Image (spheres, rainbow, N blue to C red):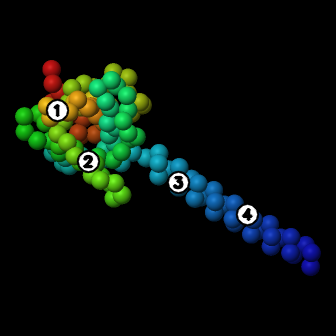
Amino acid sequence: MQLRHTRVVMTDVLWVVGFVALLAGLYYAAFRVDPHWVSKDGRRFICHGQVVDHYGNTVDNWREYRFEVLDHKRIFAKRRSRWTRRSEGVWRVVAKSDTPPKRRAVYLLASAESDNTDQMAIRLPASSRAVETLEGLRVQ
């Protein structure tokens, strides 16, 4: 009877450990994957953005933003969030990073509003259709 009880306990422990390992793996994957979507024409896309002040210090963590290309080389950005107030703004592309992370493209956007000196860094896959659009919008 003792041997049977030990086998049942070991099986239960293994199931619990396996379940916790699965949850940990899913949690890791959820925060490791960058959200990304691009429309067929490349003028609307979703990616991570991070607001940077005029000294180059980050103001916030990487957050998910929805972007839409407007006229006159401007981009409308809207932060996607259920829990906090939504932040919106109009930006223009001023630079591209020379040393982005592997398989990523990082662009620097400057505020198109005259009273705002903030900037935003956006990160998206290097193979995205939005990269070609952003290259066409860069201010020379």
Mark found first going from the N terminus, 4 or 1: 4
Q: Which label's residue is closer to the chain start, 1 or 3? A: 3
Q: Could you tell me which secondary element the residue under label 2 belongs to?
A: loop
N-terminal label among 1 and 2? 2
Mark 4 belongs to which amino acid? Leu
Q: CA distance from mark 1 to mark 2?
A: 16 Å
Q: Quadrant of the C terminus?
A: top left
Provide the secondary structure element on which disc 1 rests. Answer: loop
- Disc number lying in front (4 or 2): 2
Q: Which residue is mark 3?
A: 27
Q: Which badge, 3 or 4, is on the more N-terminal residue?
A: 4
Outermost residue, front direction?
115
Task: For mark 3, give the secondary structure.
Answer: helix
Numbered disc in front, either 1 or 2: 1
Quote the CA–CA distance across marks 3 and 2: 27 Å
Residue pictured at 23% horizontal, 29% vertical: 117
Residue wearing tag 2: 87
Q: Which residue is mark 1?
A: 115
The residue nearer to you, when weighing 90 against 103, is 90
Q: What amino acid is at disc 1?
A: Asp
Q: Earlier in the sequence, mark 4 or mark 2?
A: 4
In the rendered structure, which amino acid carries the disc numbered 3?
A: Tyr
Query: Where is 107 relative to 68, above or below?
Result: above
Residue extending farthest to the right is 2
Q: Nearer the viewer, mark 3 or mark 2?
A: 2
Near mark 3 (Cα within 10 A), the count class, few <14, some 14-19 or many ≥20, is: few
Q: Residue visible at 17% across and 39% down? A: 90
| Residue beneath disc 4 | 14
